[in-house]
Every structure is written in C-alpha cells, then in structure tokens.
Amino acid sequence: MNGEKMNTDEKALQINLDAKRYGTFAEIGAGQEVARRFFHVGKASGTVAKTISAYDMSVSDAIYGKSDRYVSRKRLQSMLDLEYDLLLKRLDASRGEKCAFFVFADTVATKRDEGQGWLGVKFQSHIREEPSQIIIHVRTLDKESLRQQEALGIIGVNLLHAAFYQSANPAELIGSLLDDLSSARVEVDMIKFSGPAFTKVDNRLMALQLVEQWLTEAAMFTADGETIIPGELLWKKPVLVERGSFRPLTNPMLDMMERGQEHFIREKCAPGEQPVVLFEMTLRQLQVGNKIDHQDFLDRVDTLAALGKPVMISNFLRYHRLVTYLSRQTDRPIGLPIGLVRLRDVFDEKFYTDLPGGLMESLGQLFKNGAKLYVYPSLDKVTGKLTTVETLEVAQNIRHLYAHLLENGFIANIPNHNPEALKVYSSDVLAKIHAGDEKLSEIIPAPIFEMIRTKKLFGWNGKNNSPA
C-alpha cells in the first residue's frame, strides 16, 4: 500500500487485520452490501461479531421499534443505539479490555434511476472510550439497482475506514468517502459528527466541506447548527429563499425578505400555511479573495442564526439551478425575494452562453415549476431615482419577453418596502464596521449589530467603543 490511496478491498482487509476493531453490521435494504465486502476479502472473523438484516417491516419494528419511515435518520439512530448496547452487554466482559467496539448500520432504498439512504458508524476511538458517531445521507445515482448496491458497499467501507483512521482530520475524512466512486454515482448531502473524537468539530463547517469538495451541490443546517437534508425541512412545503453574501445582512435585505414573505403568503400559501424561509449562499459568495475563509463563513452564519432561519450552502451560480434543486425537494410554490441589481443579472444573456438554449433555457427552468421573483426596488445613490420592475430598462431584444413575464405574474414588484431601507448601501455598512461606528446599529438588524460588536466580526474596529 506504501502511502498510496487504498482501494475498497484494501481498506476492508486493513480493518479485518486490525485486532483492536470488533463490531456489528446491521443493514436494512439493498442487501448486506457493506458486510459482504468484509467477508469477501477474508479474515472477517477478527472483525465481525454479528451481521443482521431485517427486511420484513414487522421484524424490523420488533427489533428497533416502530417508525413512520424505515429509510430515515430516526431508524438509523435506533439501529446504531440498540446494536451498540447489545454489543457491550454481550462482549464487554470478554473483549472490552482488548477491543474498541463499533457498530456500522445503514437503512437504504435502491430504486430505478435513483436511490437514497442513511449510513452511520458508532464507535470507540480507543478501548473503553465513550462512543463517537458519524452519520451520512446519500443519494445513489446509478440507473441500475445492482450498481447502486455496489456503490453503497463501497461508500460503507469508506465511511468505516475513515472513522477508524482519519478521525483526526474530518475534512480529509470527508474527501475519502468517494474513493473508488464519483459524484456521478453517489451524492453525500448530509454529514454529522458527534462524540469525544469530534469535540472540536463544527458540523456547519463539515456541511461546507461537502459542497467545497463536490460531494453534493447543496447542504443545509438549521439556525442552531443541526445539519439536515433539505427534504427533512422542505418536503411538501412552500419555500421562500433569499440568497446573498450576508456579510452582514442589512436592513434592506431583511425588509426585502419580510415584505416578500408577506406577498408570497398572500399569493401562494393556503390559509394559515407558513412557508419555510431560508437563507442561501453560494461558494462564490463565500470567497474572500481567491479562497474561502472558514472563520469568515462561521461569522456569517452566526449572524444569520440570530434571526432563527436555516442556511443553505450551494454551488448554484444561477437562479434556475437553485429553483430546479428546490423543486426536487418540494412540489409546493417557491418564492425568491431578489434585489433589482440581481434581476438585471437574471436577464443578462452573457451569463448563459454555456446553455444550448441560452437565456430562454434558463428562464424556462426558472419558472416552469411555478417559482416567482419578488423584486425589491433600488434607489440610485447619486440621482435619487427609484427603479422598480415596471421602470427597469432591459435589452431591446428581450423587452417583449420581460413584459410577458411581468404581465403574467412570474415577476412582481415589492410595493410596501421601507423607503428608509433603500438609503442603505453596502459600502456604507462596511465602512462603519471597519471604523467601529455605533451608527451601524441604524442600518443592520439589532441582533446582528450586537453580535458584530461583541465578537468583533467582519473587521469591526471598536477599540474606543464599549457596549452600551
């Protein structure tokens, strides 16, 4: 092996030959693909205490308790917890001084065109240590079930091997999950680390790593930092998403979201129904210079957390790709509050030269699933001229197209905006931050101002200013 990247069989054999590792494999759905790998390479008797596969739902319920969904995070966790407790109860006395125990579990469904599932490992990093845990959610993208099963076997081995030998470097661990695979075959859209081996791990940064390393196009976490798959939050719900760099979020951006939300609820939601409202950032928006500053990223999401909204990180440079992704998560309406400057970009043909259908193809994908743009007007800093969707000038060759979208309600002006918010410009915000100017509190939301001042975020220079 000599320092070269190991293949799947080599990884499985290394674990089998490791006398300090001993545990259980519990797999539901798609066959026992991970356990099979360890038996295939030989020497499994030194590693495998038990394998179990409960296909019948009644049998699965009898073992792990009833569940509304069998391919779910809840079912995976019950598998990991029960099998780990049984392992200790049965073997701790005889092997506990010699072995670090583990349980690998998965619950998956392979379907024609696409499958999905939850995989996890609960393990002792060292003998007698309290367990740590890694869980992931995957989408299998091969067209044939057998290929999906093969991919699950490979990523399961990768996950177990990484947990044992790469826990000290979680970013490297994440990168190894697709060894012997590709993002064309498997997507990993959620990962969560917990336990004593990962006390210094921030799972929001791990969500970012999934997108940075191209294991997924988008990852999400809640305001309290809990990593989730988008479907857990968005399934069959209306969605309102505001994208930006949020460095920091300003009063105009908050006003745009709140007024857009009011408009969206009146138009698109059933009586009493509330949409999921989230913030979204692209990797490009996270770049400071030519790289992503991870602390700067955490500063941004900390300020957004103060508003209690979930955050999505994505590789979607264009709005139509964001909407296409969200449409995969929900069949309910999608609304996008957007500033007038960004609306100009949406209709700029130079951004779509990579699409065979150019601008028309982009707009078709953007609006085909009932998405709507709620546009915040702009105020020219020099002339004081107010521009709205009705007065926006677009290129001559697309003015009829633009008029069509406007007249048919795909694009709407936000009429009840706060006139004072329009007088806030990003350059002024950054200048006040760098100067440590307390008047910043007048142009950004109060919870965000307090956090910037207290934690000295984004280059806040308040040396001569003390909190009130």
Image (cartoon, rainbow, N blue to C red):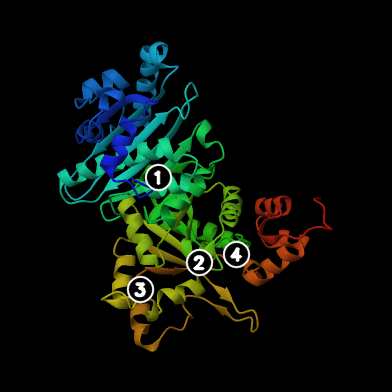
Q: Are marks 1 and 4 in contact (CB under 8 Å)?
A: no
Q: Which mark is residue 414?
A: 2
- Is 407 above or below relative to 301? below
Which comes before the other along the chain, label 2 or label 1? 1
Cα separation between marks 3 and 1: 36 Å
Q: At 47% from the left edge and 75% from the top edge, which residue is drawn?
A: 389
- Is 270 above or below relative to 281? above
Which residue is nearer to you in this view: 22 or 389? 22
Q: At 61% from the left edge and 53% from the top edge, which residue is drawn?
A: 299
Task: Return the residue found at the far bottom.
Answer: 396
Expressed as whole percent of the image width and height from the top left, the position of residue 93 reads: 41, 11
As drawn, is 79 to the left or to the right of 464? left
Q: At 66% from the left edge and 60% from the top edge, which residue is drawn?
A: 458
Q: Residue 405 carries which label?
A: 3
Residue 102 seen by the camera? yes
- Residue behind mark 4: 252
**In the rendered view of the protein, which quadrant contains the N terminus?**
top left
Which type of secondary structure does the marked residue at label 1 adopt? strand
Which comes before the other along the chain, label 4 or label 2? 4
Q: What's the residue type where badge 1 is placed? A: Met
Cα separation between marks 2 and 1: 35 Å
Residue 331 seen by the camera? no
Cα separation between marks 4 and 2: 12 Å
Which type of secondary structure does the marked residue at label 3 adopt? helix
Expressed as whole percent of the image width and height from the top left, the position of residue 214 reads: 38, 56
Which residue is nearer to you in this view: 130 or 39? 39
Task: Return the residue found at the far right.
Answer: 464
Which type of secondary structure does the marked residue at label 4 adopt? helix
Q: Count every numbered label the image shows and give the total.
A: 4
Q: Residue 190 carries which label?
A: 1
